[in-house]
């Protein structure tokens, strides 16, 4: 089983961040499958059958990105659908009186969302997408070994905690274990 499949089953928030990274890896390799095979697939610690399966998955993603016009920027519809599902669950959790800890986590994150949006984040995107954008941006800074301010670390912790709770609720909701009334 590939990392993406494992993450999708265990932690939907980490899955989405991983898939955004995959989109960027594809872009960094200019949507060229030969480049992806050389730079990613061949380095994957697996047997040849798994590598062929992984290469096929990348080819499918490249084709989807071309069809959807997101080879330069943007996200695949399959990833947008995850945001939509999570936003729906997020709103149901906030509307229900049964999830006070989630409410508290959200209200701890809300000032960071407002601040990010005043600094240029897209106001028309769902709040959760703003949260994911922030975490992804921090991930990119870390990969580039750039310094992260204390305020950004506070935001990261609050957002990560809320998204971890949301991911847990997502799994419970999929299993039919949540009662909103």
Image (cartoon, rainbow, N blue to C red):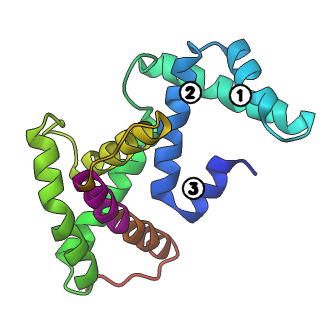
Q: Residues within 10 Å of mark 2 (few under 14, many from 20)?
A: some
Callout 1 touching callout 3 (CB < 8 Å): no
Tag 3: Cα neighbours inside 10 Å, few (<14), some, or many (≥20)?
A: some
Report how many numbered discs are placed on residues in the image: 3
Q: Earlier in the sequence, mark 1 or mark 3?
A: 3
Task: Find residue 19 and report its horizontal and vertical position in percent.
Answer: 52, 40
Q: Quadrant of the C terminus?
A: bottom left
Q: Return the mark for residue 178.
A: none
Q: How much space separates mark 2 and mark 3, taking CA atoms?
A: 19 Å
Provide the secondary structure element on which disc 2 rests.
helix
Q: Nearer the viewer, residue 76 or 19?
A: 19
What residue would you read off at disc 2? 25
C-alpha separation, residue under disc 1 versus residue under disc 2: 9 Å
Report the magenta residues as a range: 151-162
Q: Residue at x 90, y 36 (%)?
A: 49
The answer for how far apart the CA atoms under marks 1 and 3 are is 20 Å
Instruction: Name the residue tied to disc 1.
Output: 40
Residue at the image position 45 percent from the left and 32 percent from the top = 76
Q: In the image, 52: left or right of 7?
A: right
Q: Which residue is denoted by mark 3 in the rendering?
A: 8
**Helix, strand or loop under label 3:** helix
Vertical order, 159 against 2 (above or below): below
Q: Are marks 2 and 3 in contact (CB under 8 Å)?
A: no
Is residue 160 found inside the magenta-colored segment of the image?
A: yes
**Residue 35 highlighted magenta (yes or no):** no
Q: Earlier in the sequence, mark 2 or mark 3?
A: 3
Image side of residue 51 versus residue 159, left or right:
right
Q: Residue at coordinates 22% horizontally, 47% vertically from top-left?
A: 126
């Amino acid at each position: 089983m590939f990392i993406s499949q494992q993450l999708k089953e265990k932690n939907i928030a980490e899955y989405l961040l991983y898939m955004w990274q995959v989109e960027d890896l594809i872009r960094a390799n200019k949507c060229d499958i030969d480049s992806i095979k050389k730079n990613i697939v061949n380095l994957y610690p697996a047997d040849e059958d798994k590598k062929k399966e992984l290469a096929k998955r990348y080819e499918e993603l490249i084709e989807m990105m071309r069809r959807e016009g997101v080879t330069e920027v943007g996200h695949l519809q399959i990833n947008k659908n995850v945001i939509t599902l999570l936003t729906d669950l997020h709103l149901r959790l906030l509307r229900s009186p049964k999830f006070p800890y989630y409410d508290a986590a959200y209200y701890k994150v809300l000032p960071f969302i407002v601040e990010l949006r005043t600094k240029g984040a897209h106001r028309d995107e769902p709040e959760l997408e703003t949260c994911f954008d922030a975490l992804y941006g921090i991930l990119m800074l870390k990969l580039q070994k750039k310094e992260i301010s204390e305020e950004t670390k506070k935001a990261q912790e609050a957002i990560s905690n809320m998204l971890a709770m949301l991911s847990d609720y997502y799994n419970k909701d999929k299993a039919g274990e949540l009662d909103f009334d």
